[in-house]
Amino acid sequence: MPHEPAAEPAAEPAAKPAAESDASAESDASDGDDGFAAFAVAAWPRLVRTAQLLTGDFHEAEDLVQTTLAKVYGRWRRVPRSEIELYVRRALVNNNLSRLRRKRVALLLTPVLPESLRHTYAGHAEAVEQRTALQEALADLTGRQRAVMVLRYWEDLTEQEIASVLNCSIGTVKTHARRGLTALRTHPRLAAAPVPYAPAPSGARR
């Protein structure tokens, strides 16, 4: 009786190219954190910008953002994606308020002015005077007033959005904004320097 030929061993699957393996690993890692890493990388520049407006110092701003993102990561899976931007802003502002309470020192805002507060001068000296005067006036605001001013006039958030970020009522936001603007208008440094401390009301979002 003739013997049947022995079956050939099954061929082993070809190894994936290194680049493909690396891409798969990165994809798996990204899936594992539900997109947090991608969000953190994309949001980092704007969060640092906002943090620098709140702290007045670039290095402290980076520390503040790192601390905030670390706390956000712990709750990442529980926060609806439609609310993540406001959630992170709220965490950033609240962490900064906690930082201010711990340090209890007057901190200056960044010298970079928003477009609505910018003014054209003939020379560099006048521009420096403008920034310095506004810095000193903003540094004298309370932490909440400063947060409202930054979110309203630098970040262009609506009163409703600011209320969500600060976890307060719209009326409270309006009160902080009104008192903040009044403090700026009556501040000696702004009275002595030609600084356009308040944006034009026309076209402002509510």
Image: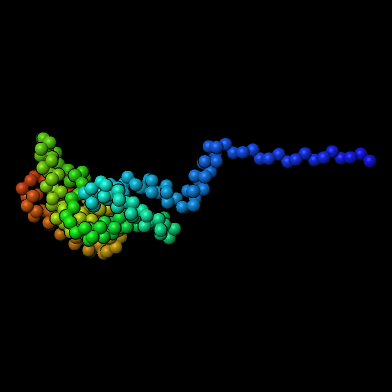
Residue drawn at x 27%, y 49% as measured from the top left: 61
Q: Residue furthest top?
A: 123
**From what the image shows, is residue 132 above or below residue 171?**
above
* Residue 137 % position (x, y): 13, 52
159 in relation to 199, above or below: below
Q: Position of residue 185 (x, y in %)?
A: 10, 53
Name which residue lies at 14% across and 44% down: 131
Q: Which corner quadrant of the image does residue 186 belong to? A: bottom left
Outermost residue toward the right in this view: 1
- Residue 69: % across, % down: 36, 53
Residue in the foreground of this view, choosing between 5 and 31: 5
Q: Nearer the viewer, residue 109 or 151?
A: 109
Q: How many marks?
A: 0
Q: Is residue 111 left or right of residue 94?
A: left
Q: Is residue 12 visible?
A: yes
Expressed as whole percent of the image width and height from the top left, the position of residue 56 reads: 21, 49
Task: Pick out the residue farthest to the left.
Answer: 192
Asked whether residue 97 appears in the rendered view, the answer is no
Q: Residue at image x 10%, y 42%?
A: 129
Q: Is residue 7 left or right of residue 158?
A: right
Q: Is residue 10 left or right of residue 93?
A: right
Residue 130, picture quadrant: top left
Left or right relative to 15: residue 186: left
Q: Quadrant of the C terminus?
A: bottom left
Residue at (52% x, 41% y) in the render: 22
User: Image quadrant for the N terminus?
Assistant: top right
